[in-house]
Image (tube, rainbow, N blue to C red):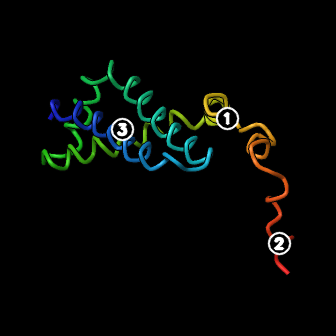
């Protein structure tokens, strides 16, 4: 069972790859969500790494079935990780906003001709 826990932790980080890929070409908010997901999982794994042995012993006591123990380890990791992060939601949100900042006002418009911005003007 204890050999499965590092795999579970790695799989949790691995799920972030799909979110990161899906965020490519999306809005700033989409990229922020994907980055928050990655940071949430990576920091959670880093917190759990020194606790692998006691966590493994605890999970082994949750069931006789190895499959159920693995499922419990996965669930417990995510629930505990979420509870640990709840007090720091605002701090994490501010960190994400600094890492992927808002686009300055008018940045896109400076590259466009203002005459073509109002498309209804030419249609009558």
Taking the spot 82% from the left edge, 77% from the top edge, the residue there is 123
Closest to the camera, between mark 1 and mark 3, is: 1
Query: What x and y, as percent, mark residue 59?
Result: 25, 37
Query: What x and y, as percent, mark residue 5?
Result: 23, 33
Give the residue pinned by disc 1.
90
Is the residue 52 above or below the residue 107 in the image? above
Between residues 5 and 113, which one lies in front from this camera angle?
Answer: 113
Closest to the camera, between mark 3 and mark 2, is: 2
- Sequence-wise, the earlier of marks 3 and 2 is 3
In the visual, does 72 lie left or right of 80?
left
Circle 3: is it few (<14), some (14-19), or many (20+) Cα within 10 Å?
many
Taking the spot 38% from the left edge, 47% from the top edge, the residue there is 18
Q: Are marks 1 and 3 in contact (CB under 8 Å)?
A: no
Residue 33 position by quadrant? top right
**Which label was assigned to residue 120?**
2
Taking the spot 72% from the left edge, 38% from the top edge, the residue there is 103
Circle 1: is it few (<14), some (14-19), or many (20+) Cα within 10 Å?
few
- Sequence-wise, the earlier of marks 1 and 2 is 1
Helix, strand or loop for disc 2:
loop
Between residues 120 and 71, which one lies in front from this camera angle?
Answer: 120
Circle 2: is it few (<14), some (14-19), or many (20+) Cα within 10 Å?
few
Is the residue 24 above or below the residue 13 in the image? below
For this orientation, the residue located farthest to the bottom is 124
Helix, strand or loop for disc 3:
helix
State the separation of the CA atoms marked 1 and 2.
42 Å
Closest to the camera, between mark 1 and mark 2, is: 2
State the separation of the CA atoms marked 1 and 3.
22 Å
């Amino acid at each position: 069972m204890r050999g499965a826990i590092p795999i579970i932790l790695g799989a949790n980080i691995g799920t972030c790859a799909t979110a990161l890929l899906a965020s490519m070409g999306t809005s700033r908010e989409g990229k922020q969500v994907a980055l928050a997901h990655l940071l949430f999982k990576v920091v959670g794994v880093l917190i759990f790494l020194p606790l692998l042995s006691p966590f493994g012993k605890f999970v082994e006591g949750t069931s006789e079935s190895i499959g159920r123990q693995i499922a419990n380890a996965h669930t417990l990791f995510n629930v505990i990780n979420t509870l640990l992060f709840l007090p720091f939601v605002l701090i994490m949100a501010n960190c994400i906003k600094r890492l992927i900042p808002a686009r300055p006002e008018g940045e896109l418009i400076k590259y466009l001709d203002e005459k073509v911005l109002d498309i209804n003007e030419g249609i009558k």
